[in-house]
Image: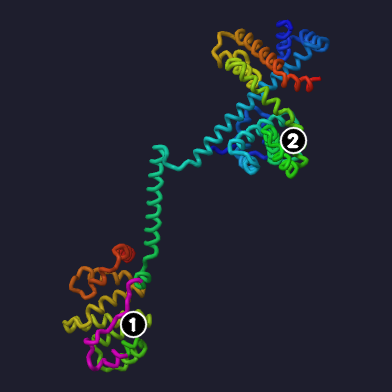
Amino acid sequence: MKVAEKYDDIELIAAVNNKKDLDKAILFIYQQYSDTVSSFITYNGGSDQDAEDIFQETVVAFIDIVRKGKYRMEASVKTFLVSIAKNIWYNEIKKRERSGYREKLYETSRDKNEQDVSHYISNREMNQELRGLLDRLGESCRKILILFYYENLSMKEIVDHLHYENEQVIRNKKYKCLQQLTELIKENPAIAKQINELIR
Amino acid sequence: MPENKQYFLIDHLDNNLSDEEILAAEELIRNDKDMANEWKLLHIAVDTIREVGLYEQVAAVRKQYQESKTAAMKPQGAVVRKMFSNKLRIAASILLFITAATLYKYTSVNSASFYNKYYSSFELNTSRGVENTNAMEQAFRNKNWSEVVLIFNKSAQKNNESYFLEGMAQMELKNYPTAINAFNQVMSENAKSKENYFQDESEYYLAMAYLANNEAGKAMPILEKIKADKNHIYHEKVLEISSLDFTIMKQKSRN
């Protein structure tokens, strides 16, 4: 197995914040912490697949929290990741209507860190719904929007990447794609309600 | 909402507006509730896109991690290249084992170990004694080695048997140089008398005495001679010596 870069917590946060080092940082997180988190998930009733999925959600949430400057390093990265994973797993259990099991676990396991993390990831369920909306746009829209807003590619680079005729074609398509996405958000009542509460 | 207004907000979001246009866009967002909501929705949409991008990046690394982890756990030999590699590993292991074993064998075989492995005490044949050595024979059979030596030293009439038994007693007492002298004496007497009385026994145990005395260079030619001589009474005994041990000792005796 390829060995990831070695990071201490401070270096890892720096790598997470640096786009070109992000792959290495994610691989390091997997190599260092996935077994710990997976053990927790499987010990608490999750399958191996649950453990893998929850850890992926955990890593995404962690990077998001770090990039938004909300991780203050009051707890180690390991502790913080485990806390995020616990919260995501408890929410997943709740979603699966196993609340009795969840409450039992929650009462015996939660601590200060988890409460803080719980606040950080309170919108993750809605975010999952939103991610699903992007899939409904179609592959070309999805690619253009991700290349532009996530990869930060220029219109010219996107033209080269996706083999469109010219930049204007891409620009027009991007307008329409983003517009479609906002329409889908507005059309989804559950999401719209949560968003209205958030933006009120 | 007019499409041009929404595109205007998207351009604002993408930082594609001039300074004047930025001021106009900010004023629009401040004064138009629909535009304000649209502005917030655009931010949510872009946040979603960025999260999906991040999700995909993490998923790609997850896949890479799991594939490498699976590959690391997969039993060797599933791929032809790995089978070849396995064969090499097995061959290397065997070679390493043989090398280690040979090295161990080479270093462990020496005069002392050779002597300890192949030396066995001489058993006196009851029909072979002569009258004037009865006391000596009796002491020998009783394994009273000091008594054997004492009787030999007191004996005025020495013969090949007494020399030989004295040599064997010295061997048992670990006085190897004295034993060597005794066996050489037997062969010297035989050379003079043209007889072979206790010749074969003395040759074989002389070789053993040399080994015990760490003189493999003198021992091995004798053993080689016995090995080549089918009529030698210790021929079969020498043949029992492992060929590898024999070869190693021959090699070492030449160094």
Q: Quadrant of residue B189?
A: bottom left
- Relative height, residue A22 to residue A136 (above, below): below
* Residue A177 on image: x %, y %: 64, 13
Q: Is residue A19 above or below residue B198?
A: above
Question: Which quarter of the figure has residue B37?
Answer: top right
Secondary element type, mark 2:
helix
Q: Which residues are magenta?
A: B117-138
Q: Secondary structure at mark 1?
A: helix
- The single residue placed furthest to the right in the displayed view is B31
Q: Which residue is mark 1?
A: B178
Q: Residue at x 72, y 9 (%)?
A: B6
Which quadrant of the view contains residue B196?
Answer: bottom left
Residue at mark 2: A117
Q: Is residue A32 visible?
A: no
Q: How far apart are labels 1 and 2 at the CA level?
A: 91 Å
Task: Give the residue type that dot 1 points to.
Answer: Thr
**Residue A1 counted in the magenta span:** no
Amino acid type at circle 2 is: Val
> Which of the two residues, B108 or A155, is positioned nearer the viewer here?
A155
Instruction: Give the quarter of the figure containing the C terminus of chain A.
Output: top right
User: Residue B205's x, y, as percent?
Assistant: 29, 77
- Tags 1 and 2 touching, CB below 8 Å: no
Q: Is residue B137 magenta?
A: yes
Whether residue B190 is visible to the viewer of this picture, yes or no, is yes
Q: In the rendered structure, the residue with mark 2 lies on which chain?
A: A
Colour setting = rainbow
